[in-house]
Image (cartoon, grey):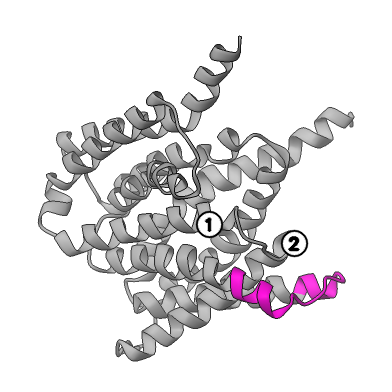
Amino acid sequence: MSRSTRLALPLIASLFALYFIWGSTYFVIRVGVESWPPLMMAGIRFLVAGCVLFSWLLFRGHKVPGFRLWLSAGAIGILLLAIGNGLVTVAEHMDVPSGIAAVMVATVPLFTLCFSRFWGISHSRVEWAGVAIGLCGIVLLNTGSNLSGNPWGAVLILIASLSWAFGSVWSARITLPAGLMAGAVEMLVAGVVLLIASHFTGEHLNAMPSTRSFLALGYLVVFGSMIAISAYMFLLKTVRPAIATSYAYVNPVVAVLLGIGFGGEWLSPVEWLALVIILSAVLLVTLGRFVFRNRHRG
């Protein structure tokens, strides 16, 4: 096997994990919350995944992070996983279709661009045009039948997207544990916070979850958390950010198709148009900075 092939295989596998595994988690979350309380399920998901990954890293010789690193990683874990993913899980429990949830979350790169201004990062007119187009898409999506009748679900996903975007920008500007240890600590803290929130909101199991929901939880722990997060960390180290974050405009397509094909979901013509507009905006923001900047340099 040639060196180029050895390098290409993990890259392809990582992109597959982000595109299809993360894209599928929206539908799997919907399956899970059929019989799991949402905060409880999300908490178990991240606590178990964090414990397994943390234990594996200790076995491989990694050191336990210091107190300050725990604090910084914990804060990011709360923003990204406890609030970002937790509220999406709650929204799907409130009958927001998994495909619609994925389309809303696809706006994260747009909000990321806005929050980066807090740290003095300048952006081109093309990128701001992408934000404006994306906001139009959000407004259009909320006029569709799936969200217009569920305003609280739409608000929760919007807050989740804002939290994920802010946490993503902030995480690049604070010191975190090295490598996968950052993800392990983030999942551990998020899992504990979500389970505490589950307790204080009065969640409880009325009956044993179905086999289908147990399998969904297992998929989220192994594939949606440990494997996908590891793949994302690998891509951030080996490829340009535009490639690593390209999942943002692939995940919604995967989620929508899975929801329609296996979950009986549907999108109105207005919502399909909103999907196209939002994905076009994300593509403009994600790739525009490189394309137009390179042309300017040329």
- Vertical position of residue 168 compared to residue 131: above or below: below
Q: Amino acid at mark 2?
A: Ala
Q: Please state, as top left, top right, bottom left or bottom right, where the N terminus lies in the image.
A: top right
Using the rendered view, name the quadrant where residue 212 is placed. Answer: bottom left
- Report x, y in % for residue 156: 27, 63
Q: Residues within 10 Å of mark 1 (few under 14, many from 20)?
A: many
Using the rendered view, name the quadrant where residue 36 is placed. Answer: bottom left
Answer left or right for 241 relative to 3: left
Disc 1 is placed on an element classified as helix
According to the picture, the residue beneath numbered tag 2 turns out to be 178
Task: Report the residue at 25% width, 39% height from top.
Answer: 135
According to the picture, the residue beneath numbered tag 1 turns out to be 170
Q: Which residues are magenta?
A: 56-73
Seen from the viewer's position, the closer of residues 120 and 211 is: 120
Q: Is residue 49 visible?
A: no
- Report x, y in % for residue 205: 35, 88
Please tell me whether mark 1 or mark 2 is closer to you in this view. 1
Disc 2 is placed on an element classified as loop
Check the image and name the residue furthest to the top: 298
Task: Report the residue at 70% width, 48% height from top.
Answer: 234
Answer left or right for 236 relative to 114: right
Which of the marked residues, 1 or 2, is nearer the chain's N terminus? 1
Task: Report the residue at 66% width, 56% height from top.
Answer: 230
Using the rendered view, name the quadrant where residue 84 is placed. Answer: bottom left
- Report x, y in % for residue 242: 56, 33
Seen from the viewer's position, the closer of residues 158 and 129 is: 129
Q: Please state, as top left, top right, bottom left or bottom right, where the C terminus lies in the image.
A: top right
